[in-house]
Image (cartoon, helix red, strand yellow):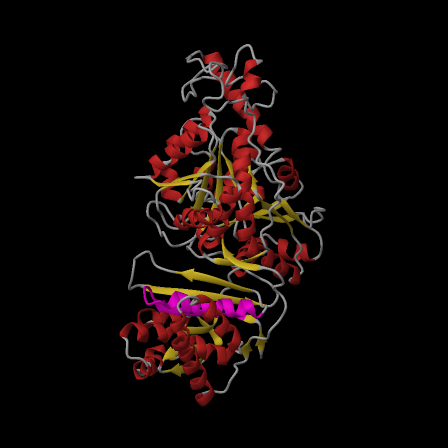
């Protein structure tokens, strides 16, 4: 049966062989044909030599989550070939380098084999050893363009864009593409029964990764200081910030940078610099992943208790310890929410798309300064390092940065006594000043120790309790300031619901469609922030059973919901995935059905009743 614009292609390569550019060329050409496409780069944490994969889902229906099974495998790595052959769906296709015969152990009767002598053609057509290695990848992209009906003109346009300023590289790359095309034309029936047809489904969407979006969001937010220590998968956040800042934050008269990027000696120093810069009135941030977040705990506690704004972008990866540093998870939820010792609670934002990475990064600075507290944006490797189709970013040039409650010199002059930790407005949020605002008033110690309302050191238990209670009042105020949830089928017509956040969005929404086709209707809510506001609590109280979808082992979001909202644990059913790969809709549906069938609820739900 012919499948148009609905299949999965996976490339099996060797890390460090230049395959990433060719694979991206393949995915972007499909995007340029107006067809929704989702690429995933699956790479090892070593520098070179281990297997790497690049998986591309094509979905004319617009499903952007990862899907189980491979329809066409392009395998040029003998190390992984056994598993690669096994991953192809029955009836699917296995494209391999036929320069050498395929070993019998890799033969399956239920799939189709397409042998193309990539290396033999490279040796025959190119003399430079490095070109031979690189153009092998380009040849298979050309072969796929014939097999799958990719518009060859789109590939040529992309090569022209890619090698702008290096025009001499365009001709040999086009030659390599045509080698693949011509070989397919001469030896195989084409196109295959899985193929592409040009559509107009992309509209004005863009293809971008979440880390780049965060970096751009920080520039638009007015950030001027970034202090960081490199760590996968967050490194490109600050790199993107630097690239955008060089274009947008350089004084046109002097040529001097209006920003500073400091690579610290470690994560502790990085967050310390961020807190110091924010205390002095700059907008400053850092980016890290789980191990860095662990190291930053003590300083985050200082910023929470001393009430200093700070923005941290946490691009989560598989832990604990070194874990799987190039695999994705949502496993820092609890450690971020309660980072540091003692009673602490931190504002968290959960973006699901690059557009939300851009917007929430900008909003994080407003929230941090509005609440005088750290705000942590919880991205992950899948969102941060992979390209995603996104709505265009929009910025209102009239937008004014919200700097929060800050006394200026005139206001300080009219105050008899400035109380740094004095709750003037009864919302838990106090006033601060920037250093040097007034020659005498407003000078204060920002204390990480117990103090009274005027920042005077004290170990009086009553003063400590007043301060901690005020911080909780501020936390409740934060509930009115953070982004509210996104609610699907919000009339709460169904007793069963699903809850998801972050990159689980893509597969969760597809799972809803699959369940609906099975006759099972569920309501749904996407959490965008912590603390949970009234709408989250009302939604959860209105349902009998809520499946909580998350990508970690210990159901951390579920624990957070139970702890913060006092929900009965039995009504929150965990749907988990923690193998380092993005969760799939198939997996979600399977786990929900596995729960419903033994409980006898599956058939009851279909009949419209649930007791």
Q: Position of residue 52 (x, y in %)?
A: 36, 64
Q: Nearer the viewer, residue 101 or 555?
A: 101
Look at the picture and state if 87 lies above or below 489: below
Q: Quadrant of the N terminus?
A: bottom right
Q: Is residue 114 left or right of residue 607?
A: left
Is residue 201 shown in magenta?
Answer: no
Q: Position of residue 51 (x, y in %)?
A: 33, 65
Residue 532 seen anywhere in this rendered image of the structure: yes
Tell which residue pokes out farthest to the front in this image. 253
The quadrant in which residue 478 appears is top right
At horizontal 48% and vertical 39% (from top left) the residue drawn is 223
Q: Is residue 413 left or right of residue 122?
A: right
Tell which residue pokes out farthest to the bottom in this image. 186
At horizontal 45% and vertical 24% (from top left) the residue drawn is 306
Q: Nearer the viewer, residue 465 or 166?
A: 166
Residue 340 seen anywhere in this rendered image of the structure: no
The quadrant in which residue 580 appears is bottom left
Is residue 20 shown in magenta?
Answer: yes
Q: Nearer the viewer, residue 40 or 261?
A: 261
At horizontal 45% and vertical 31% (from top left) the residue drawn is 278
Look at the picture and state if 108 lies above or below 416: below
- Figure label count: 0
Q: Position of residue 125 (x, y in %)?
A: 33, 83
Magenta residues span 7-33
Look at the picture and state if 255 lies above or below 78: above
Q: Nearer the viewer, residue 39 or 339?
A: 39
Look at the picture and state if 382 lies above or below 346: below
Q: Is residue 561 left or right of residue 495?
A: left
Q: Position of residue 322 (x, y in %)?
A: 33, 48
At horizontal 57% and vertical 37% (from top left) the residue drawn is 568
């Amino acid at each position: 049966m012919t499948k148009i614009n609905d299949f999965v292609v996976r490339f099996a390569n060797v890390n460090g062989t230049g395959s990433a550019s060719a694979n991206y060329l393949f995915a972007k050409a499909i995007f340029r044909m107006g067809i929704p496409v989702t690429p995933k780069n699956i790479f090892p944490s070593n520098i070179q030599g281990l297997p790497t994969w690049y998986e591309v889902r094509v979905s004319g229906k617009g499903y952007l989550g990862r899907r189980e099974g491979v329809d066409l495998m392009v395998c040029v790595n003998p190390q992984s070939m056994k598993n690669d052959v096994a991953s192809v769906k029955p009836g699917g296709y296995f494209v391999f380098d036929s320069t050498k015969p395929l070993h019998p152990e890799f033969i399956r009767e239920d799939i189709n084999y397409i042998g193309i002598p990539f290396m033999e053609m490279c040796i025959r057509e190119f003399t430079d050893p490095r070109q031979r290695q690189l153009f092998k990848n380009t040849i298979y992209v050309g072969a796929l363009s014939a097999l799958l009906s990719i518009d060859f003109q789109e590939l040529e346009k992309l090569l022209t864009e890619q090698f702008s300023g290096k025009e001499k590289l365009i001709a040999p790359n086009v030659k390599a593409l045509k080698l693949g095309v011509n070989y397919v034309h001469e030896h195989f029936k084409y196109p295959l029964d899985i193929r592409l047809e040009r559509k107009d489904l992309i509209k004005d969407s863009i293809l971008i990764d979440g880390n780049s979006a965060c970096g751009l969001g920080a520039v638009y937010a007015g950030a001027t200081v970034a202090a960081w220590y490199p760590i996968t998968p967050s490194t490109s956040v600050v790199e993107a910030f630097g690239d955008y800042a060089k274009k947008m934050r350089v004084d046109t008269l002097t040529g001097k940078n209006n920003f500073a990027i400091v690579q610290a000696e470690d994560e502790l120093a990085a967050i310390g610099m961020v807190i110091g810069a924010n205390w002095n009135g700059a907008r400053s941030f850092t980016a890290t992943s789980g191990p860095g977040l662990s190291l930053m705990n003590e300083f985050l506690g200082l910023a929470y208790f001393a009430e200093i704004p700070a923005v941290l972008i946490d691009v989560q990866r598989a832990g604990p310890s070194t874990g799987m540093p190039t695999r994705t998870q949502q496993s820092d939820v609890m450690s971020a929410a309660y980072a540091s010792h003692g009673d602490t609670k931190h504002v968290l934002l959960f973006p699901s798309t690059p557009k939300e990475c851009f917007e929430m990064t900008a909003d994080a600075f407003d929230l941090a300064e509005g609440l005088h507290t750290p705000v942590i944006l919880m991205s992950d490797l899948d969102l941060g390092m992979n390209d995603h189709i996104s709505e265009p970013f929009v910025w209102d040039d009239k937008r004014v940065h919200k700097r929060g409650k800050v006394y200026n010199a005139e206001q300080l002059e009219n105050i008899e006594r400035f109380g740094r930790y004095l709750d003037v407005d009864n919302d838990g949020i106090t006033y601060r000043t920037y250093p040097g605002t007034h020659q005498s008033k407003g000078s204060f110690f920002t204390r990480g120790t117990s103090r009274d309302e005027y920042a005077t050191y004290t170990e009086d238990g009553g003063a400590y309790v007043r301060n901690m209670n005020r911080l909780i009042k501020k936390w409740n105020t934060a509930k009115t300031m953070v982004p509210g949830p996104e609610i699907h089928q919000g009339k709460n017509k169904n007793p069963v619901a699903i809850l998801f956040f972050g990159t689980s969005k893509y597969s969760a929404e597809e799972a809803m469609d699959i369940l609906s086709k099975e006759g099972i209707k569920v309501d749904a809510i996407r959490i965008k922030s912590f603390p949970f506001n009234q709408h989250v609590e009302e939604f959860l109280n209105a349902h009998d059973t809520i499946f909580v979808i998350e990508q970690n082992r210990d159901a951390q979001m579920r624990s957070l919901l139970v702890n913060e909202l006092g929900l009965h644990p039995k009504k929150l059913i965990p749907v988990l995935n923690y193998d380092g790969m993005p969760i799939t809709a198939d997996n979600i549906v399977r786990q929900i059905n596995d729960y419903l069938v033994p409980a006898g609820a599956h058939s009851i739900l279909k009949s419209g009743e649930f007791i």
